């Protein structure tokens, strides 16, 4: 029973990570390199900074904590960076980070999923670490989609061809 739970939990976490990556790819396709680094105002971050922030957060929570590797995150630089990396570079960095996190999640034993640990000043089990990473990724994916829609004044078609009006059985 434990192994079935682990497999189901892992499968759903990986799916959600893939969905956010897919949606971020669609958003980034719409933006020029200049728009990628545009800030809506002084208190908000650019899409480029959000991508760097997601890479840092996913690395700290999943790759470092769950994957039991050294935590080398420099959170402040994620928001301060204005080096204007091209979107191809950012998307590649995001995909590589997510792929490494997915390996760490997929390889996590039940013991690793249940073990409590300190991450960024919080105390989470491995399950909590994964839930945080998936939720945090989804949250910022929504911000990226919103800002992209604001800049482009168009629907991004995340679910093009899918009937979202189907009722539950």
Image (spheres, rainbow, N blue to C red):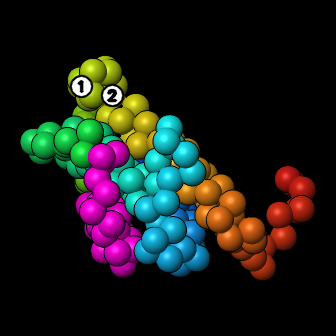
Q: Where does label 2 land, which residue?
A: 125
Residue 130 coordinates in the image, percent (x, y): 39, 41
Residue 142 coordinates in the image, percent (x, y): 60, 52
Q: Relative to 54, is 157 on the left or the right?
A: right
Tell me how far mark 2 sits from mark 1, CA to CA: 6 Å
In this view of the protein, can residue 60 be seen by the observer? no
Q: Where does label 1 land, which residue?
A: 117
Q: Relative to 84, is 7 on the left or the right?
A: right
Task: Determine contact: label 2, label 1, CB under 8 Å.
Answer: yes
Which is more toward the observer, 85 or 68? 85
Counting residues from the start of the chain, the first of labels 2 and 1 encountered is: 1
Residue 152 coordinates in the image, percent (x, y): 68, 70
Badge 1 density bin: few <14, some 14–19, many ≥20, Cα 10 Å: some
Which is more toward the observer, 66 or 64? 64
**Quadrant housing the N terminus:** top left
**Quadrant housing the C terminus:** bottom right
Q: Residue at x 75, y 71 (%)?
A: 154
Specify start and end residues of the magenta stretch as a single range. 78-103
Please tell me the numbered disc located at residue 74.
Answer: none
Which is more toward the observer, 116 or 86? 86
Q: Main secondary structure of the magenta part?
A: helix
Which of the 4 image quarters holds residue 124?
Answer: top left
Q: Residue at x 50, y 38 (%)?
A: 43
Q: Residue at x 89, y 56 (%)?
A: 167
């Amino acid at each position: 029973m434990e192994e079935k739970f682990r497999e189901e939990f892992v499968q759903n976490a990986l799916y959600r990570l893939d969905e956010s990556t897919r949606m971020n790819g669609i958003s980034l396709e719409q933006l020029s390199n200049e728009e990628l680094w545009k800030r809506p105002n002084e208190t908000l971050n650019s899409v480029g900074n959000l991508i760097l922030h997601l890479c840092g957060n996913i690395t700290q929570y999943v790759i470092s904590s769950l994957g039991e590797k050294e935590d080398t995150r420099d959170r402040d630089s994620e928001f301060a960076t204005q080096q204007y990396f091209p979107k191809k570079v950012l998307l590649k960095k995001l995909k590589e980070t997510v792929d490494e996190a997915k390996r760490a999640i997929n390889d996590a034993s039940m013991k690793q999923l249940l073990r409590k640990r300190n991450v960024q000043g919080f105390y989470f089990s491995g399950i909590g670490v994964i839930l945080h990473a998936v939720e945090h990724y989804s949250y910022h994916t929504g911000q990226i989609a919103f800002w992209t829609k604001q800049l482009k004044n168009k629907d991004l078609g995340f679910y093009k061809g899918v009937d979202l009006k189907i009722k539950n059985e």
